[in-house]
Amino acid sequence: MADHGDLKPLFGGNRDAEYELDLRGLDLPHSAASVERMLECSRFRAPRSVRVLIDAPDGEGGGSHFQPLGRLLLDARKDGVLSAMATLPPDDALGFRIVTTGKPDGDEDGGPDGDVVKGDLVD
């Protein structure tokens, strides 16, 4: 693994989360739609921490989802939908760790409709 030296403060130190949104293998429109759905559902649920996993750049000039999804999550933070957001540590998977604002008295159960589907929240 590369030595990230002075860049370490740019990464969040916490990789643990209650849920995981795995977007690896999805194209950008489907990834963005999954994030938007998760953010919308989070408004009605108790606050929770979520790891959002994305594919690493392919090294062949293909675009990464890091910047567009990062912007989407930053906008959600500005709008008050997220209370915290950080990139995952460099020795972990590529992605973000977020904490939703939610509703303190919101629903505590698992993923949307109890389904576990790629691109949806899973335990």
Image (cartoon, rainbow, N blue to C red):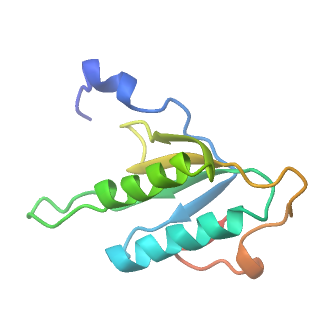
Q: Is residue 95 visible?
A: yes
Residue at far right of view: 105
Q: Is residue 74 left or right of residue 68?
A: right
The correct choice, above or below, for 121 with respect to 103 in the image is below
Residue at far top of view: 6
Q: Is residue 77 left or right of residue 100?
A: left
> How many tags in the picture?
0
The correct choice, above or below, for 112 with respect to 121 in the image is below
**Image point (66%, 77%), residue name:** 116
The correct choice, above or below, for 32 with respect to 105 in the image is below
Locate residue 8, reporting x and y percent.
Answer: 35, 24
Q: Is residue 67 left or right of residue 91?
A: left
Q: Quadrant of the C terminus?
A: bottom right
User: Hey, which quadrant is residue 7 in on the image?
Assistant: top left
User: Hey, which quadrant is residue 23 in on the image?
Assistant: bottom left
Q: Nearer the viewer, residue 88 or 34?
A: 34
Q: Quadrant of the N terminus?
A: top left
**Image point (76%, 81%), residue name:** 113
Locate residue 46, reporting x and y percent.
Answer: 81, 55
Locate residue 19, reporting x and y percent.
Answer: 66, 57
The correct choice, above or below, for 9 with respect to 50 in the image is above
Locate residue 62, reporting x and y percent.
Answer: 15, 67
**Image point (72%, 62%), residue name:** 43
Q: Is residue 123 visible?
A: no
User: Hey, which quadrant is residue 90 in on the image?
Assistant: top left
Residue at far front of view: 79
**Image point (43%, 71%), residue name:** 32
Q: Is residue 58 left or right of residue 1?
A: left
